[in-house]
Image (cartoon, rainbow, N blue to C red):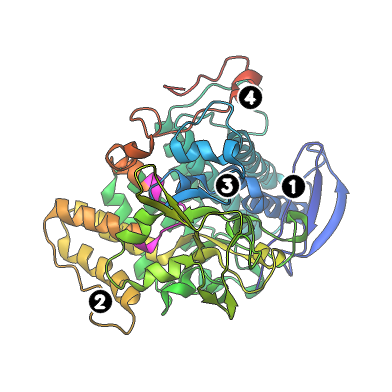
Amino acid sequence: MKKYRIKISVIFITIIFIKCSSFLDIKPQGELTQASFPKSSSDALLAVNATYSTLRNWFYHSGGYPILDIMSDDAYKGSNPGDQFATVGPYNTFNITTTQDGLDRWWTTLFLGIKQANVVIENIPNISMDEKIKNTYIAEAKFLRALYYFDMVRAWGDVPLVTTTAAPLQLPRTPKKQIYEQIIQDFQQSLEALPEKSAISPDQMGRATKGAAKSFLAKVYLFQNDFVNAEKYATEVILSGQYSLEENFSDANSEKGEYGVESIFEIGARRNEGFENGGDQYSNNQGVRGTPNRGWGFNRPSLELKDSFEPNDPRMDATIIFLHEILDGIEILGDGTTPDIVYDTNGKLIEIECYNQKVWTLGNNTITAWAYNRRLLRYADILLIAAEASNENGKTAEALKYLNTIRKRARGNKPNILPDITETNKTKLRDIILDERRHELALEGHRFWDLIRTGKAEQILSPLGFVKEKNEVLPIPQTEIDLSQGTLKQNDGY
């Protein structure tokens, strides 16, 4: 079942009301301004729903294109060679400029989400309404503000910290340590009022939960190399009994597994074209190009990713769509303007036409691709965070238990593949867990940031153009620096 559809701005922008009975029902309510909104309990619901809407905005997904995979060793630009070459191509080679298309959209969209959250956090406490519902709304807004800032701090490092609706127009960058402190505070403060996933009714799936807040806390601590707290929160999620792995790996990202046992936090969408109609363009952007026409074909899996899987790992076929493969009775013929095979000047095979299977949806046209629910965090990620943190904390047996749980699901009913890992050397096991993350979470937007946080980026990405002490973060959009009249300072190297 598909759930939420939400849109807002708070100042001078139309606010669209979403019925409580379904996140995706559309009920226009006219124009409201910050001076008159929110004032009532119904306004409060409107405001918190609007804070979720940023998640389905196409620009929320790293500015519209899956650049985080494209900047990793897991994917190329994709599409046909000339399509969006100036827009997306520079991310493929780290020739990213301060005016690079997409960065301004991503930055603005994340700050819009933060502003929407601030409206809820600041104004809803003054509304006379049921206190339990009020506290839940505020907790949801703090969860979302933390989520949006987590993207910002990873993408740009130091960014302006805005926790009020009355912030000055010109704000300097705040040290990322302070940003992380705010993220942790918001996630922690949301815990008490958020419900467990099991308490969410089917028509409200997609809202923040206690398990989602703890899961993101585990991930945030992992990015700070605080392995004690990463292990603590990941273990609490595991022991909660709220989540488990899907029996089949392919269901973890498919329509069959929407809001399923493995889903911790995902973005709902409807099988309709257009954001305003409940759709989400995330899958359409990456869908098979040509025949069948399922989308634009960006984010093409790399040969490096394909060849990195262990022999007969079923996750490889479940991650990559190959030409002439048959999915749901449809033969994948691909795009006539895209070369099936690409060689370099030395005759070495460097690219083949293939596509991201994790975003495949049922159907035979581009509109059906708008129905995809993107999983921002799933239980497999938490198991791997627990494995990594346990290894760093000297708990090898626990690390191996979590790691081998992932491998057991992946091998399915084939006992002769993907044997259990028995390595006990911390350094070697650290690399094994990172490789397992690559294969389990491929093309889900994790690989680039995993390489950054583990210090592996220079070693692995420098052949693609990565420059140490520069490309760990993106350039601040030049438009934002101009609007700040120089208050914002550019990241080093740009």
The correct choice, above or below, for 408 with respect to 66 in the image is: below
Question: Is residue 154 visible to us here?
Answer: no
Tell me the residue that label 4 is attached to. Answer: 479
| Marks 4/3: CA–CA distance | 19 Å
**What residue is shown at x 33% (from left), y 30% (from top)?**
468
The disc labelled 1 sits on which kind of residue? Ile
Q: Secondary structure at mark 4?
A: helix
| Marks 1/4: CA–CA distance | 23 Å
Mark 3 vs mark 1: which is more N-terminal?
A: 1
Is there a contact, CB below 8 Å, between mark 3 and mark 1? no
Which of the two marks, 4 or 2, is nearer to us in this view?
A: 2
Tell me the residue that label 3 is attached to. Answer: 65
Q: Which residues are magenta?
A: 439-449
Q: Position of residue 256 (x, y in %)?
A: 55, 77
Tell me the residue that label 2 is attached to. Answer: 417
Mark 4 vs mark 3: which is more N-terminal?
A: 3
Image mark for residue 8: 1
Q: Residues within 10 Å of mark 1 (few under 14, many from 20)?
A: many
Query: Outermost residue toward the bottom?
Result: 413
Which of the two marks, 1 or 4, is nearer to us in this view?
A: 4
Mark 2 vs mark 3: which is more N-terminal?
A: 3
The disc labelled 4 sits on which kind of residue? Thr
Asked whether 462 or 179 is in front, the reply is 462
Asked whether 40 or 327 is in front, the reply is 327
Lateral position of residue 237 relative to residue 25, left or right = left
**What residue is shown at x 73% (from left), y 61% (from top)?**
278
